[in-house]
Image (tube, rainbow, N blue to C red):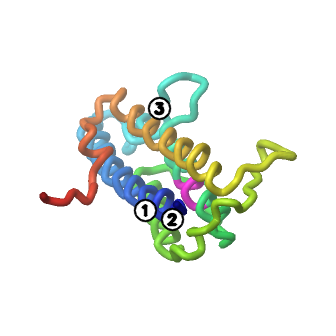
């Protein structure tokens, strides 16, 4: 049985990035609601964007950037199509939402036939010189777990800081069918 790498990569990444964008809306509203009169404009937003769970982990803003990079670069490696370059210059929720939107727009240009059938493609990563993964192993054992790790870490940072997001926000947009 052939695995459809498009369905196990592109489709869920688009869904999760759109969910993450909705989560950013809630975080932005939360930051505005906590703004104190005597703080400069954006102080709460900046605090959330630069918050992290532990000192040795990347802050929220970097988690979102990496999730976007995983999505566009991962699909690029599988399809052989060059990924757009995004500078890591975001400093606000709206700038992060724009980055997510650009990433989703790129993913939507990927035609299924460029990813389907790439199970044996040799995927190399700069972090592991002299080694490669098959397209199937890359997609299922590295790309998707790493992508979800950064999305859930971003989500967890917001939860830790009191943003009212829940599993329904994280698992939004599931195409349920009726029986």
Q: Which residue is mark 3?
A: 51
Q: Which mark is residue 11?
A: 1
- Say few, some or many: other residues with alpha carbon within 10 Å of mark 2 (under 14 / 14 to 19 / 20 or more): many
Task: Indicate the position of residue 111 as horizontal and vertical percent values.
Answer: 52, 77
From the viewer's perspective, is residue 176 above or below residue 162? below
- Mark 1–mark 3 distance (CA, rounded to whole Å): 29 Å
From the viewer's perspective, is residue 94 above or below residue 59? below
Q: Which of pointers 1 and 2 lies earlier in the amino acid sequence?
A: 2
- Mark 1–mark 2 distance (CA, rounded to whole Å): 7 Å
Task: Indicate the position of residue 145 as horizontal and vertical percent values.
Answer: 53, 42
Q: Secondary structure at mark 2?
A: helix
Task: Indicate the position of residue 60 as horizontal and vertical percent values.
Answer: 48, 39
Q: Which mark is residue 87?
A: none
Q: Main secondary structure of the magenta part?
A: helix
Contact? badges 1 and 2 (CB < 8 Å): yes
Comparing 50 with 64, the one in front is 64
Residue at image coords 45%, 43%: 151
Task: Indicate the position of residue 146 as horizontal and vertical percent values.
Answer: 56, 42
Q: Which of pointers 1 and 3 lies earlier in the amino acid sequence?
A: 1
Q: Give the foreground label among 2 and 3.
A: 2
From the viewer's perspective, is residue 27 above or below residue 121? above
Q: Does residue 106 appear in the picture of this structure?
A: yes
Q: Does residue 46 appear in the picture of this structure?
A: no
Contact? badges 2 and 3 (CB < 8 Å): no
- Mark 2–mark 3 distance (CA, rounded to whole Å): 33 Å
Q: Which of pointers 2 and 3 lies earlier in the amino acid sequence?
A: 2
| 115 in magenta | no
Image label count? 3
Q: Which residue is mark 2?
A: 6
Q: Which residues are magenta?
A: 68-72
Residue at image coords 52%, 70%: 106
């Amino acid at each position: 049985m052939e695995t459809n790498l498009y369905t196990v990569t592109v489709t869920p990444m688009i869904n999760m990035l759109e969910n993450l964008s909705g989560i950013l809306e809630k975080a932005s509203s939360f930051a505005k609601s906590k703004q104190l009169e005597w703080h400069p404009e954006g102080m709460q937003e900046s605090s959330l964007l630069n918050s992290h769970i532990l000192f040795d982990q990347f802050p929220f803003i970097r988690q979102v950037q990496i999730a976007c990079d995983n999505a566009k670069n991962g699909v690029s490696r599988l399809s052989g199509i060059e990924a757009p370059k995004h500078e890591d210059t975001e400093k606000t929720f709206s700038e992060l939402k724009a980055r997510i939107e650009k990433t989703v727009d790129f993913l939507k240009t990927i035609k299924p036939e460029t990813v389907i059938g790439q199970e044996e493609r040799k995927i190399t990563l700069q972090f592991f010189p002299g080694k490669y993964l098959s397209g199937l192993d890359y997609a299922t054992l590295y790309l998707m777990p790493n992508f979800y790790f950064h999305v859930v870490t971003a989500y967890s940072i917001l939860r830790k800081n009191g943003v009212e997001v829940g599993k329904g926000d994280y698992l939004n947009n599931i195409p349920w069918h009726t029986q």
